[in-house]
Image: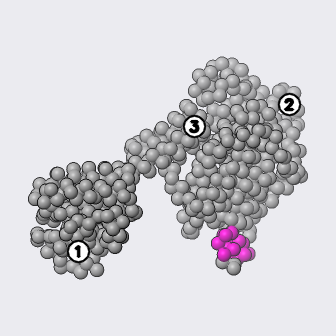
Amino acid sequence: MLSRLYDFMPGLNTLFHYERKWFADDVRAALSVAAVALPVAIAYAQLTGVNAAVGLYSCILPMILYALFGSSKQLIVGPDAATCAVIAAVVTPLAAGDTVKHWQLVVTMTAMTGFWCLIASKFKLGVLADFLSKPILMGLLNGVAITIIVGQFSKVFGFTFDDKYLLERLGGVPTYLAQTHIPTLLMALFTVAVYFAMKRLKPTWPASMFAIAFGAVLVWLFNLKQFDINTIGTVTGGLPVFNTPIYDIGVIRELVVPALNLAIVSFVSMMLTARSFAAKNGYDIDADKEFRALGIANFASALSQGFAVSGADSRTAVNDATGGKTQLVSIIAAGIIAIIALFLTAPLEFIPSAALGVVLIIASVHLLDLKAVWQLKRKDKHAFYLALATLFAVLFIGVIPGITLAVLLGLFQFIRTVMRPTDNILGVDIKGVVRSLDATDKAKAVQGVFIYRFNSPLTYFNAGYFKRRLLEQYARQKDDIHCVIIDAVPCFTHLDLSVMAMLTDLDVIFKKRDIRLEIAGRKRQLLSWFEIAGMASGKEGIYVHSDLYIALQKNSVSQSSAAVNEFDTAEVKEISTQ
C-alpha cells in the first residue's frame, strides 16, 4: 500500500524517511529560495499583466504540491520568464484592456496548461522531454529573452510602447528615447547600482530583493510618486478569492492551442533543469511523473488564482548551491511566501515599476546565451540553423507563432530523421564479427554477398526511400552479387503493409537478376507478418534467418565467410558502428 502511495507521490517517500541532519541545510536553502522567488514573482506578475499578489499566489500551492508529486529533490517550480511572456502575448489582445477579464483569462489558460500536462502524463508522453531538441529550445529561450528585454525598456525609460512587434519597436527607438522620463530612468539606474553593489559585496545574498527593497524605501521616504515615478500600486493581500469567469466561453477556443504549446515548452524546459541537477546529485527522475506533477502544480496555481508555472532554473540553482537536500525546501519557502502574501503586502505597493523592469532585464540576460547558439555553427551547422530559425521566428513574428514553429521544427526534425536516416553496408572483420564497411578497412565485404542495414524503423513514408537506397548501394558494388541480405533488427519494428508490398517489389526485381533476397533477424515476427500480408517465404519467396551469422553461414563462399563459420553464433554478438 505504501509503495503504491510513494509511487504516486514520490516526495512523500523522502519526507517520511527524513533525516534530522538535513533540516539545517533545507531551512537555509528555503530562506535563500524565498528571497530570490519574492522579487521575481512580483516582477513576473507585472510581465503577465496581473496584480503582484497573483505572482505570490503562483508560488505557494504549486511549490507545495510539486514537492509531494515531483520526482526531483532539487527542482523549484514557480513563475518563469518564458511562460509569463507566452501568457501575456496570448491574453493581452483577448482581454482588450479589461483587467478583470485579463486576470481570469490568465487563470483559465493556466488551468488548461495543467489539463494538457495531465493528459500527456496519462498517455505516458514524458518522451516529449526529448521532443524539442536543445538547439530549438536554445533559439526559443534566446528569442523570448530578447523580447522581454526590449519590452521592459519602456519601464526603465518611462515611456509606453505604441507598437506591438519587436521590429517596429526597434525601428522607433529614436522617437521612444525622446520620451524618456528622467526620474524613472534615475530610479532604474539606482536599482542597477544596488544590484551590482550587492553582487560584489555580498555575492551569496539575494541582490534582486535588496535592489527592489531599496527602491521601495526611497519611494516611501521621499514620496517619489510626486515625480510621476510609477509603482506597482495596491497589492490585494489575504487569501485568493475564486471568481466565476465573466467572459464569453467561446474565448476558450483561442486558448487551447497556446495552452498546449505552453505545456510542451514548460515541460521540456523544466526537464532540462531537473535532469541536470538530478545527474549532478546522483539520482534519476521519471519524465511521466514530472509531467503529472507539472499539471498538478498548474491546476493548483489556477485554483489559487495564480498563473502558469514551470521549473525555475535560477531558484533551483540557488537551492542546490545553498545545500538543499530534499523537497522540504519548497514547502518551507512556500510557507514564507504565504505569510508575506497574507499579512505583509502593504509595503509592496511602493515598489517602483522601473526596479521591476531592471530585475526582469537582469533575469532575461541570464536566460540569454547567444554565444552558445553561435558555437553551434562550428559544432553542428544543421543544429545552428534550427536554433537560428526559431530565434528569428520569436523575434520577428511573435512569441506564440515562434513557439508553434519551434514545436513544428521539432516534429519535422524527427520526421526527417526517420524518413531519411543513415544506412550502412556491412562486412566481416578478421575475427568473424559483422561490422560496417568504412574507411578504416577493419571489415571486408563478403564475396558474393551484399549486406544492407537501414538505421530507422521502416514505415509507409520511408519505404520508397529504403528501396531506392538499397538499389543505389547495390548498384555501386563491383563484385558479382548472388545474395542480398537485409539486417532486419533496426528497421523491421512493426507491421506495415506498405513495407511488405515494397519487399515484394524488391524480391521481384532481384529475382529477375537471379539474385536471392534474404532477411536476417526477427524471424518469428517476420514470418507472421508474411502470413498476414500473403507473402511467400523460403524457396518460393524471401528467405528469413534468425540472425546475420546464420545467413552468412548459409551464403558465404569466400575466406571471410569461413571465419564466420568458426564462431558459435549463440556466443557471437553483432557489433556495428552506425
Q: Which residue is mark 2?
A: 225
Q: Nearer the viewer, mark 1 or mark 3?
A: 1
Q: Which residue is mark 3?
A: 401
Question: Regarding mark 3 in the picture, which secondary structure is present there?
Answer: helix
Q: Residue at x 66, y 75 (%)?
A: 4
Give 291 or 221, whichever is nearer the viewer. Answer: 291
Q: Residue at x 78, y 53 (%)?
A: 303
Q: In which quadrant is the C terminus drawn?
A: bottom left
Give 178 or 123, whichever is nearer the viewer. Answer: 123
Cα separation between marks 1 and 3: 54 Å
Q: Residue 226 lies in what quarter of the image? A: top right
- Amino acid type at circle 1 is Ile
Q: Which residue is mark 1?
A: 550
Span of residues in magenta: 4-20
Give 555 or 310, whichever is nearer the viewer. Answer: 555
Q: Nearer the viewer, mark 2 or mark 1?
A: 1
